[in-house]
Every structure is written in structure tokens, then in C-alpha cells.
Image: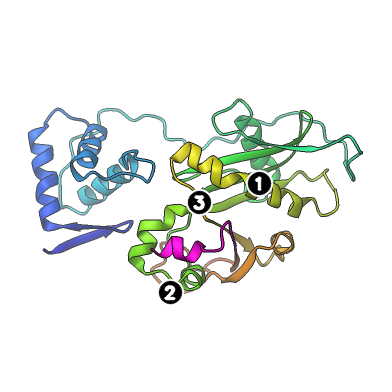
Amino acid sequence: MEIITTYQGKAVSSTDIDVIKELISNNPNASRRQLSKMLCELWDWRQANGHLKDMVCRSLMLHLDRSGYITLPPVKRRPNNPLANRQKKAWLSIDTTPVTRLSGNETIEIHQVRGTPSEKIHDSLIEHYHYLGFVYPIGEYLKYMFTIGDRPVACICFSSAVRHIKCRDDFIGWTKETRDANRHLIAYNTRFLILPWIRVHCLASQLLSKVAKRVSSDWEMYFNHPVYYLETFVDTERFHGTCYKASNWRYLGKTTGRGKNDQTNRQNRSLNAVWGSAFVKDFKELLGR
């Protein structure tokens, strides 16, 4: 069976191309969205939570169309794409009174805010106070906000794991096949923000420890599978990763500085330190089986 192309780890053969062409021919009035869902059903192409990989499939079909392997029907409508037409999150007026320590009756609460009214607050704070700003998470994701009473003090977000990182993959010791099969069992910490007027000593490591106790069970509730490992990148030109080290995360190595779509094998961005943290002792066995 001849492999024509590979897209995000999905090998597409000449037989697959014929199947897609037949699908398009047999459904002349179907939209591109409808066709991608039909193809997912035909291939039984699903996420770990059982949902169809509709968006990935749609991107694959567009890739095949642009490469000349298939001809998609004309676009029927263009819904707003928040990833392509990104608008800056609204500025929120919040209490910026400095906090340097917690009083005896004050406790920091953690809230999972995806799908709640507080998600807009989380996104706005990341947009305006995190040096990387806000970006829409890819794949599975959860967002958390830490508060004292009703007052936000910090935000953290986790999403689907990065496809391949050499130092992480070497540390886990999995093959390409097991990585592709089990990558959904890792969550990637994409953003971590403590608001600049919150200056409580050692707060960052305390919050990391607090959220680590919830992520796996929350992930299982939302996506029907646990996560056994957390990973994150730390920009070595800005930070030392002290809070991750203090929370018993493990330093795994550095990225290559080339990005996932590199074609030159040359560094084109700053190097990031890769840190990881396991929930269970036998995580390597669970990720590698």
C-alpha cells in the first residue's frame, strides 16, 4: 500500500485517497464540514474521549485539496474563526491592591473555569498580564483560576501535550507508535500567571502542588481518560524554573529552538527548558504500553 502523504501523524495511502474521492462524489451537496464528519465516521477516527477528530480531518482534507490529491466542493459559508481572526480580550477592572502575605483566615481556592462565566476573566488576565498573551488552546484543555474570596490571584491552563519533544520522549522511552497512541495521557501546562501585585513568598510552587492534585481527575471527568504526566516549557532567557523545581518537577532537557514545523534544522527561537511531573510511580509503564 503506497503512502501518499502524512499529516499530523496520520499516514494517507493511495487507497485512502480513492475512498475520499468516492465519498465526495457520492455526496455532491455535502459541505466540507459534513464530508469531514462522514470521513471520520468511515475511518472511526476519534479522540480518546470518543469524539470525532473532525477539525483535524477537515484540515487533512484541505491539505489534500491544496496538494492536488482531491477536489473539495466550494466553501458554502465562512464562519468566524477565532484562531485566524483573533481579537484582544476585553480589559477587566479588578482589585490591584498589593498582597504580600495571607492573613490567618484567608485561603486560596482553586476553580476549574472552562465553560463557566469565570473563563472570560481567566482569558482576560492571561491576555493582559502574561508576557505571551492569550491564545486559544489546542485539543483537550482545562483552565484554572485561583482566588482569595472573589478576588483572582493566579491562573493556569493545561492543554493537549506537544507532539514530540526529544528529551521528553527519550526520558519516557516510548516508541513513535506508543507515543502516538498515548500522548493524550500527558497534559501540557501552556500558561501560568501569578498577577503582578500578588507577592506572597513561595506562592507559585504551592499553587502548582494544589492544581496537580486535581488535573487528572478533572481530565477524566471532562475527557473520559486520566493524565499520568504533566509537562511544561520554561523560557531560559527569562526564567529559571525555580517554582517547578520547588514543586518536585523534573528537568528533562532543552528544546532545539526550531519549532514543530521547522524545515531548516536551524534554531529560530529561544531555547526552552522542559520540565515534567508524574502523578503515579509507574507512569513510564502506563505511557509506554
Q: How crowded is mark 2: few (under 14 residues within 10 Å), some or many (20 or more)?
A: few
Q: Which of marks 2 and 3 is nearer the N terminus?
A: 3
Q: Which amino acid does label 2 sit on?
A: Asn
Give the secondary structure at mark 3.
loop
Q: Which mark is residue 140?
A: none
- Give the residue displayed 22% in from the left and 31% down from the top: 31
Residue span colored magenta: 275-289
Task: Determine which residue is flagged by label 1.
Answer: 211
Q: Where is residue 123 in the image (x, y as percent from the top left)?
A: 62, 37
Q: Position of residue 57 (x, y in %)?
A: 28, 44
| In-image side of 13 versus 242 (left or right) | left
Q: Position of residue 113 (x, y in %)?
A: 60, 33
Which numbered disc, 2 or 3, marks the residue closer to the eye? 3
Are dots 1 and 3 in contact, CB under 8 Å?
Answer: no
Q: Which mark is residue 265?
A: 2
Determine the CA span between mark 2 and mark 1: 36 Å
Taking 15 as reference, is 105 above or below it?
Answer: above
Taking 220 as reference, is 75 above or below it?
Answer: above
Q: Position of residue 55 (x, y in %)?
A: 34, 41
